[in-house]
Image: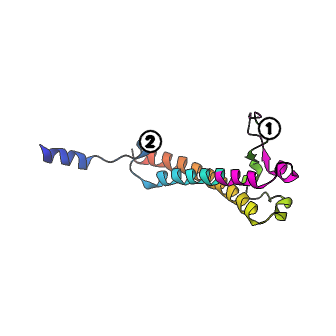
Amino acid sequence: MPSTWRSFVAARPSTGPLGIMSSWLPESFFFLSGAGVVLHVVCMIALRYNIDAETPLFEQLFTHPFLGGLTDTPWHLRGRYFLPWVASPEDLTEYWILPRALFWGARLGAMILAIGAISFFLSAFYFAGHDA
């Protein structure tokens, strides 16, 4: 009986997340997206506290979230800065290196999130369709 059980378990293909046949690729893209979220949120919060809220740069960088005007000060980085072809604000060059690095970290984190999420869904659909 034990040998039959071992052969049954060994013959069964192992499945990963979402019932997809074991592949490290979709899982890696999912974790990459999570790392992008963490990088973006940490850098965005740190940038928010490094720039004074009364400056024009703060108004240029941050906005209220969609349908979220519940706070007095905006706290989301504007979406246009996630696009690589949009230049960073000119006023940011007057600041020292930490706010500039935090801005680029938040921008990079958002791009990693978007690329990782799209790649995750594409690879998950690919593996779900080809491993069945």
Sequence-wise, the earlier of marks 1 and 2 is: 2
State the quadrant of the C terminus: top left
State the quadrant of the N terminus: top left
> Type of residue at label 1?
Asp
Per the rendered image, the range of residues in magenta is 42-70
Count of marks overlaid on the render: 2
Left of 89 or right of it: where is 113? Answer: left
Q: Depth check: give the residue in front, 16 or 65.
A: 65
Callout 2: 10 Å neighbours few (<14), some, many (20+)?
few
Q: Is residue 49 above or below residue 104?
A: above
Callout 1: 10 Å neighbours few (<14), some, many (20+)?
few
Left of 28 or right of it: where is 99? Answer: right
> Type of residue at label 2?
Leu
Please report the residue visible at 78 percent of the width from the left and 42 percent of the height from the top. 74
**Rendering quarter of residue 86:** bottom right
Which color mode does the image show? rainbow
Q: Depth check: give the residue in front, 30 or 120.
A: 30
Q: Which mark is on residue 72? A: 1
Quick one: SS at disc 2?
Answer: helix
Which tag is nearer the camera, tag 1 or tag 2? 1
- Image coords of residue 20 (percent x, y): 42, 45
Please report the residue visible at 81 percent of the width from the left and 63 percent of the height from the top. 95
Measured in 3D between alpha carbons, the distance from the residue under mark 1 to the one under mark 2, in whole angstroms, is: 41 Å
Q: Is residue 120 above or below residue 64?
A: below
Q: Is residue 49 magenta?
A: yes
Q: Which mark is on residue 18? A: 2
